[in-house]
Image (spheres, rainbow, N blue to C red):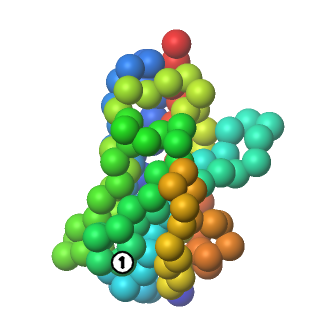
Amino acid sequence: QVQVMESGGGLVQAGGSLRLSCTASGLYLSHYAVGWFRQAPGKEREGVSCIHWSGAFTYYAPSVKDRFTISRDNAQNTVYLVMDSLKPEDTAVYYCAAGLVWKSLPMGRTCPQIDFGSWGQGTQVTVSS
């Protein structure tokens, strides 16, 4: 059974940092592109960042670019999202997802949700002002 799991969420003050981790069982995450997505209360889920299975290519949403960093350690079967300079508007449930599709995207775009078939349950990130 395939399971994708997020961890590392929590409560942090504005300007602080958090590191989210994404791991999986039942699949080799190193063979998959991984995306981070988030859903704030009352809003649609949106893409945050994604990384190619090799780690060589990444995309970021404009709202997080230069503040968030996605990376992966394929030996540990883990993908990370380091979030710095957090803002209250970053408050959301953060999801990671694995997929086998990778596309070349224009600047300012991140991987579409439809390209990811295995999703975690999410981890809450709350940024207080």
Closer to the camera, 129 or 62?
62
At label 1, counting other C-alpha atoms closer than 10 Å, the crowd grade (few under 14, some 14-19, many 20 or more) is many
Closer to the camera, 103 or 82?
103
Q: Amino acid at mark 1?
A: Trp
Residue denoted by label 1: 53
Q: Is residue 89 left or right of residue 5?
A: right
Q: Is residue 87 above or below residue 45?
A: above
Residue 95, percent across and down? 55, 56
Residue 13, percent across and down? 43, 18
Q: Is residue 31 above or below residue 104?
A: below
* Residue 126 shows in this picture: yes
* Residue 25 shows in this picture: no
Q: Is residue 86 above or below residue 51?
A: above
Task: Give the residue at x 35% y 68%.
Answer: 57
Task: Give the residue at x 47% y 40%.
Answer: 64
Residue 85, percent across and down? 38, 26
